[in-house]
Amino acid sequence: MAALSITKGCFTATTKIILKITQCRKLSSQLNAVVNHLSLLRLSPSASAAASSSHGSLLHSSPVRGFHSSTACFFHKTQPVEDLMEFFDHKDTWGEKTVTCGRPYRLDELRIKSNQDLHKLWYVLLKERNMLMTMEAEYTRQSELFPNPERITKVEESMENILEVVKERDNAVSMLETGKPSGPGGAYVRDFLGRVVWRDFKEYAVPPHVNKVYRLLHPRGFKALHLKYLPLWREKIARKRWGRYHGQRKMNEELVKKFPHLEGKLTVPLPEEPKIY
Amino acid sequence: VQILKGIDKGKQGVVCWLIKERNWCYVEGLNCFYRWLNRSANNPGLLTKVEKPLLVTTEVSLLDPSDMQPTGVEWRYDADGNRVRVSLRSGRIIPMPRKALDEAEDYVDKNDYIEQIWDTKEKELTKVTFQPVASSFEQDIMNSMGIKEDRKRAPKFYY
């Protein structure tokens, strides 16, 4: 049975948070204290109404956080949840030594999903990751062992896989439509030493001659023809190769002295010319 | 498997532990060393036998089930499309242990797993919702959400 790690579904946002002080360990009690504090921060209808009374807006029981409008406006989604409790795990897992966790989403499983599904899944995974990181921070703060820390790695792997699938799809569309691969691409360029290297392009907001770092690495008037490095580098490579060649030849001479039957049979290939463009 | 190198060379045993990162395997009861525990002036201590790892690639060889002799092995696909290990000498399929197939990377057995409320159901997982569209991911999401972007994009530079 393929079971996977996915965040809790939407649970109804209640107006009152009832905190059950369970017989968990010290951590649980500490967490409860934190949660109690946080629950007060959560927008309750009365509080929000008071805050936005000047605006005269009508807000329903579960308002979207940070949304104020002067006119009566209902902003409905499936089940709006702005509970800060979402940053925490299920209450029954608090203080547990192990939390049951599945495996990450595989590439093949993500490839059969639509773009909209992947988009939604990304945010689900993001929220899960935030939740796990919050829990990890809290456990370390209490000097306790965070149960199943591999959960974070699994979520990250799932997210990476989503990015991979999206990249594949974009590339496929791009190739079909334009014949060019999607993405920034790359090219063979001369680096600051004049060496011809493959450079993977990155996205910048400014052109190269405005980019400070790029200008330092590729100053104007710095032409490869004037570089002294390239012939010196070529010399070094060639010297090493010739050194090996001569060394091998000397060794062969010694062998022939010892074993005269090898005369004329031992050959050393001449070194190749270093390819410095 | 049969051990090819070391003190227990030539002996056959069952692999009990694997460390994938180092290509190590531990064979039950073989290739061991002895270690004294809690040894002191007063206490004679406890002599324990501990297995040493063996390299999967060179120091250990899989056995052909037909004659129980070490063979070279190749991964091939059988008639049903499963990836199986085939003995190069006889062509016999070497079966995979159930644990190797069912155990996930975090050493949790597939059959022992208890599904939680936060886990994705198999039905939802295998459901195909993909519809190929001739637009980029970003554009497809914008279309489905009804986001219309008329503003001209600032120039981007790639170098």
Image: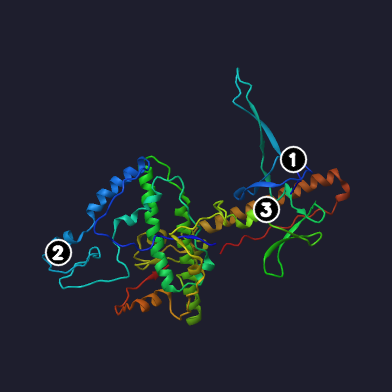
In the figure, A16 relative to A186: above or below?
above
In the figure, B37 relative to A193: above or below?
above
Mark 3 or mark 2, earlier in chain = 2
Count neighbours of disc 3 (C-alpha within 10 A) and say few if under 14, some if 14 to 19, many if 20 or more: some
**Would residue A258 be found to the left or right of residue A87 on screen?**
right
Q: Residue furthest top?
A: B42
Which amino acid, mark 3? Answer: Trp
Count neighbours of disc 1 (C-alpha within 10 A) and say few if under 14, some if 14 to 19, many if 20 or more: few
> Pointer 3 indicates a residue of which chain?
A
Q: CA distance from mark 1 to mark 2?
A: 79 Å
Q: CA distance from mark 3 to mark 2?
A: 82 Å
Q: Position of residue B153 (x, y in %)?
A: 32, 75
Which amino acid, mark 2? Answer: Ser
Q: Residue drawn at (14%, 61%), measured in percent from left and top?
A: A51
In the figure, B45 relative to B155: above or below?
above
Q: Which mark is residue B6?
A: 1
> Pointer 1 indicates a residue of which chain?
B
Q: Secondary structure at mark 3?
A: helix
Reading the image, the residue beneath label 3 is A242
Q: Which quarter of the image is occupied by the N terminus of chain A?
A: bottom right
Q: Position of residue A24 (x, y in %)?
A: 37, 43
Reading the image, the residue beneath label 2 is A52
- Residue B122 at least partly seen: yes
Q: Nearer the viewer, residue B9 or B65?
A: B65
